[in-house]
Image (cartoon, grey):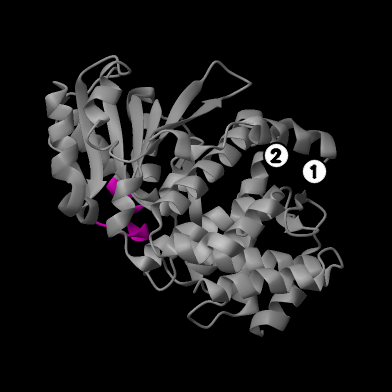
Amino acid sequence: MTSEKQTLWRDKALTASENAASENIVRVGLDIRESAKSYDILIGSGLLAEAGERLAGLLPSRKICVVTDETVAGSYLVPLMRALDAAEFKACPPVILPPGEETKNFKQLEYIINKCLSYKLDRNSTLVAFGGGVVGDIAGFAAAVMMRGTGFVQIPTTLLAQVDSSVGGKTGINTAAGKNLAGAFYHPKIVLIDTDVLKTLPPRELKAGYAEILKYALIDDPAFFGWLEENGEKLLKGDAAAQKYAIEKSCRAKAAIVAADADEKKDIRALLNLGHSFGHALEAIGNYDGRILHGEAVGIGCLLALEFSRARGLCPEKDVERLRAHLQKTGLMTAPPFDVSAEDMFARMQSDKKNRDGRIVLVLARRIGGAFVARDVDGADVRDFLKNKFGA
C-alpha cells in the first residue's frame, strides 16, 4: 500500500471529531466518494427507544420488517417494536432466526425473503437488521437481492457488529467452500448503535468484539493501540465511557476507509481484513459450531499475521510479543481451542476472497500500526509457516 493511498483515508479519520463525551449521541458520517451514497452512524445511550422517531423522517414508507435472532428477541425485541409502533410504523411480524454463525446459509436467506414477500413488502419497504454480525450480514443480503433492492437499516446489538460488520455495506452468507463467499455490497440507510445493549452482552461476546477494535489500532493507529493497552480491561469490564470512545474511534476509522474504497477495488479497504485470512480458515475448520467465535478467530488471526510478517523479516519481535501480551492480558485467545493441521489451514486459506490468480493475498504488518496488503506472498512460505505453528 502506498503512502499516498494511506493518507487518502487516514487524514480524514484524524481530522474528524473524536470527542464522544460532549453529547449523548455521536454522529459519524459515511460519505462514499465514488457515488452519491452516504449515511449516518449514530452512537449513544437510549437509541433503541428512539428508533422509531429516528427512522420516521428517513424511510420512504412506514412498511417495515425486523429481522432478528432468538437471543436478541428475548431481550430487546419488545422495546424496539414499541418504539416503531409509537412512530406509526406498519411493522410486520418479525422474522426470528436461530442464533449462531451456522444461520448464515442459503436456507435461512430463502426463509427471510419468502417471509418478507408473504408480508407484501415492496421496494419502498425496509428490512431492519436487529442483532449481531450474523443477522446484519444475512438480513442485508436479503435486502440487497429481494426485488433487486429494498430499504435496509442496521441496529447492531453486539460489540463486534457495532464496531465492524454493521458499517460499510458488506453483506453475505457462508457456503460449503468458505465464509462470506456469497454476498453483495449493500449499504444501510442508517446505523443506530445503542451502547446500552452491551450491558447484557456476555463477556465472551464482548471479547470477540474487542478483537475487531484491536484490529483498527493494528492497521494504522499505534496511539490507539497504546490507549487500548491502558483501557482495554476497563472497557471489557463494562466501563461505558471507554466502550463509547472505542466504538466511535472504530466507526470513524472504518467509515474513512470505506469512503475511500467502498467496493474494495484498491488496496485500502482490504486492510480491514487484517487477521481474517487466518481467522476465516480457523472458523471453517471449527465448522462454525461455537467453539471459536468470529472475533476470537480474528484476534488469533491478527497474531498469526504479525508472526508471519516477523518470519518474513518485516515486523519486529517486540511488536509481535506486545500484541501477544495484550491478548493474554485481556483474556483473548492466542491459539485455537481445537487441533489444526497446516494442510487443512492452507487449503482453507486458498479459498479466501482476496486471493487473485491462484495466489494468496494477505494483510501483513511492518509494525503495530503499519499494516499493508501483500500480493507477492509465496504459498510455500505460508505452508512452511503453518507447519511450524500447527504441524503437518
Residue 105 belongs to magenta span: yes
Residue 66 belongs to magenta span: no
Vertical placement of residue 75 versus 279, above or below:
above
Task: Looking at the picture, tell me which residue is in the foreground, 209 or 239.
Answer: 239
Q: Which residues are magenta?
A: 98-108
- Which residue in the protein does label 1 denote? 1
**80 left or right of 303?**
left
Vertical placement of residue 201 versus 130, above or below:
below
Tell me whether the residue at label 2 lies in contact with that at label 1, contact meaning CB atoms closer than 8 angstroms: yes
- Distance from disc 2 to disc 1, alpha carbons, whole Å, reads 7 Å
Name the residue: 48% across, 35% down.
169
Amino acid type indicated by mark 1: Met
**313 left or right of 364?**
right
- Which residue in the protein does label 2 denote? 268
Whether residue 263 is visible here, answered yes or no, is no
Q: Residues within 10 Å of mark 2 (few under 14, many from 20)?
A: many
Q: Secondary structure at mark 1?
A: loop
Q: Residues within 10 Å of mark 1 (few under 14, many from 20)?
A: few
Q: Earlier in the sequence, mark 2 or mark 1?
A: 1
Q: Secondary structure at mark 2?
A: loop
Name the quadrant containing residue 8: top right
Name the residue: 20% across, 54% down.
70
x and y percentages locating residue 108 in the rendered image: 28, 48
Whether residue 238 is visible here, answered yes or no, is yes
Name the quadrant containing residue 324: bottom right
**The C terminus appears in which quarter of the rendering?**
bottom right
x and y percentages locating residue 164 in the rendered image: 49, 46
Vertical placement of residue 101 versus 328, above or below:
above
